[in-house]
Amino acid sequence: METIVEEIKRLKAERKAVILAHNYVNPEIQDIADFLGDSLELSFRAKKSGAEVIVFCGVRFMAETAKLLSPNSTVLIPVPDAGCAMADMVNAKMIEAYKKDHPDAFFVAYVNTTAETKSKVDLCCTSGNVEKVLKSIPADQEVMFLPDRNLGGNMNQKMGRSMDLWKGYCPVHDAVTPEMIRRARAEHPEALVLVHPECKPEVVAECDYALSTAGILKKVKELDAKEFIIGTEKGIFHRIQKENPDKKFYSLNPELVCPDMKKITLETVRDALKNMMPAIELPADMMESAVKPILRMMEL
Ligand code: 13P
Ligand code: SF4
């Protein structure tokens, strides 16, 4: 009798599929992925994949980005309603309304946005390249950064910019407080604190490093320190501990869980491969506009 993991591997070979997964998905999904990464790495991987079928284990905006970059592949999303609360805080209509009052604004969209939103903006960024992307925009250009007020606010502070910020936020990272950092440091005085830049500026001010998930994974390997307090979604602990068996990792708060990332299970991945659905479908005109700010980002 085939196990579910064997079944997924068989179906994957039959369908000529690759499985891409984000660092926050459940451990058993991370273990069957062909590639695991942050939003930026996953975008590059989707673009060069060339696979007939991509099974995207993550939230919907990530699968949409894969479809935009690999339009000839069938992009399966095992749970179609795995969304991102922050991405849903802005839409095309809201952007059009803002544009009426700010005709000269240049729109930078965090990659955590729907394809519809991307079709209305000038340039994308991820938490892994946000500084580089913003450096490419003249300092005197009026900029609207959306949807994450925290990532944008952190960049305004770090880079001395005064971008206008959308009022969006990630409910998981926005719940982190400076008090959590102080408490964790008191419990583990030797540990360094790494958080995601979707945390509030007052939190980032108290950490040692604010980095994307791939940035956190890279940094803990490079540093000589042996103990780390990690302020991001729980899913990262599986990989971080596996890659650094001699180091100790403490969670800033074990309740940092993205419920949408956790919707992806082995059963939903198996069923997606078996039924070849649900697949990402986007209107052609939206795809044409939405891919532009992503390609512009990738060319930088
Ligand atoms: P990364 O690009 O850093 O992996 O972040 C994605 C995300 O959704 C963070 O909440
Ligand atoms: Fe969206 Fe936050 Fe979940 Fe990331 S962790 S997918 S930003 S809700």
Image: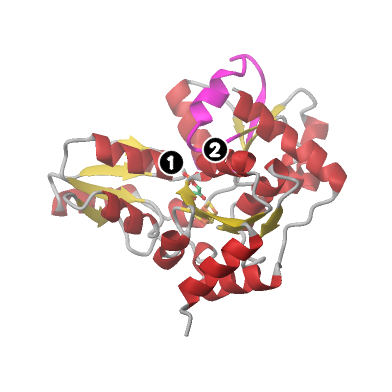
Lateral position of residue 19 relative to residue 231, left or right: right
**Closest to the observer: 279 or 290?**
279
Residue displayed at 65% across by 44% down: 50
Q: Mark 2 packing: few (<14 Cα in 10 Å), some, or many (20+)?
A: many
Q: Determine which quarter of the picture holds residue 241.
A: bottom left
Question: What amino acid does circle 2 point to?
Answer: Thr
Residue displayed at 32% across by 59% down: 253
Q: Residue 140's mark? A: none
Question: Which residue is tagged 2?
Answer: 126
**Closest to the observer: 86 or 6?**
6
Q: Mark 1 packing: few (<14 Cα in 10 Å), some, or many (20+)?
A: many
What SS does tag 1 mark? loop
The reply to whether the magenta stretch includes residue 78 is no
Residue displayed at 72% across by 29% down: 122
Q: Is residue 157 above or below residue 59?
A: above
Q: Is mark 2 within 8 Å of ligand 1?
A: yes
Disc 2 to disc 1: CB gap under 8 Å: yes
**Closest to the observer: 133 or 34?**
34
Compare marks 2 and 1 and give the one earlier in the sequence. Answer: 2
Q: Residue 212's mark? A: 1
Measuring from the top left, give residue 148's x and y in whole percent: 56, 43
**Closest to the observer: 261 or 207?**
261
Measuring from the top left, give residue 114's x and y in whole percent: 69, 49
Q: Is residue 243 visible?
A: yes
Q: CA distance from mark 2 to mark 1?
A: 8 Å
Measuring from the top left, give residue 72's x and y in whole percent: 75, 47
Q: Is residue 96 visible?
A: no
**Magenta range:** 125-150
Question: What amino acid does circle 1 point to?
Answer: Ser
